[in-house]
Image (cartoon, coloured by chain):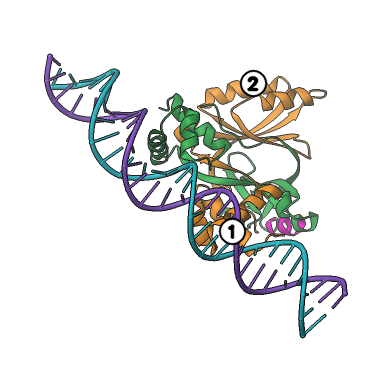
Chain colours: A orange, B green, C cyan, D purple
Amino acid sequence: MLDELDRRILEILAANARVSLKELAQEAGLSSPSAAERLRKLEERGVLDGFTISVNPARLGYPLQAVVRVRPMPGMLHIVDRLIQETPEIVECDKVTGDDCFVAKMLVRDMAELDTILDRIAEKAQTNTSIVKSTPVKRRLPPL
Amino acid sequence: MLDELDRRILEILAANARVSLKELAQEAGLSSPSAAERLRKLEERGVLDGFTISVNPARLGYPLQAVVRVRPMPGMLHIVDRLIQETPEIVECDKVTGDDCFVAKMLVRDMAELDTILDRIAEKAQTNTSIVKSTPVKRRLPPL
DNA sequence: ATGCGTCGGTCGAGTTCGTCCAGCATGAAT
DNA sequence: ATTCATGCTGGACGAACTCGACCGACGCAT
């Protein structure tokens, strides 16, 4: 499916998505047009979903991170789903199997804000909140 | 801390980190040198942490995603920490407060692989695994 | 074996983009 | 009021991207 060159290209871009085609090409051992073509195909195939940035939440004014598990009360699933999507402090959320229906990552400015947001959710769901103390594994690619 | 232009720049880059400086500049209403300078300062200040890609795990051969909560057995914390970091299928992991010490996101090819990896962890920790059914909120920026 | 089509690659030319520099406007401090 | 610092613009130069043409390797059928 992916050959060695594609893997190499993905790894280089994962480390720095803004490298020039020229640099990408020579790090992968190709000419620029070839690298550009492979890049195009990776996007076309949907393997490569997009280019984005990684920000430092603390430097943006969000020193506190929490993982919140959310179990909607009976009949509230859709409403809770919408509430989560419309809460901008929730920066990612998965719907999962098991008792906890959602697992969300939240960024907040302080405990007061965390409390406010959780109160709003608690009207429609049980929640279980863990404060993030550190991040042993930062977002990375799986084995290619 | 950040002004309106910086926010705009971050949003544009979050949507597409590979836009040309020229395009970034005109979407933000600036000249290229100004946009370049602001970009440089955002990186320098550490607000902007880096440029990366978003991949489609399924297209990479990982159709299954799981959220695993990990509670190391007494005395095993450091060993479990290392095991997590050295498991490449774990693509992100936070250390959190509460009974569950770690919350990890895992990508696997199938149930068998999930089982293998969890067995390895289960020698040193209790685990609680939820399969991801969908992702209501894909990674996004908090309010700026 | 030979010829043919396809795929993926390089090379070179034209165009676009990024970076550097000089000059100007604004606002704060002396 | 003058001065200084900051941040912006516009133009010029060098670098990077894109497009077309061409080449070689491979698979396949004759």
Magenta span of residues: B115-121
Q: Residues within 10 Å of mark 2 (few under 14, many from 20)?
A: few
Q: Residue at x 65, y 20 (%)?
A: A120
* Disc nearer the start of the sequence (1/2): 1
Image coordinates of residue B74 in percent, x first then y, are 61, 52
Main secondary structure type of the part rendered in magenta: helix
Label 1 lies in what chain?
Answer: A
Image coordinates of residue B112 in percent, x first then y, are 79, 58
Q: In the displayed structure, does residue B41 sit left or right of residue B105?
A: left
Residue B118 belongs to the span the image colors magenta: yes
Separation of residues labelled 1 and 2 (CA atoms): 54 Å
Q: Residue at x 53, y 33 (%)?
A: B12
Q: Which mark is residue A104?
A: none
Q: Disc 2 designates what residue?
A: A119
Amino acid at dot 1: Ser
Label 2 lies in what chain?
Answer: A
Image coordinates of residue A2 in percent, x first then y, are 68, 60
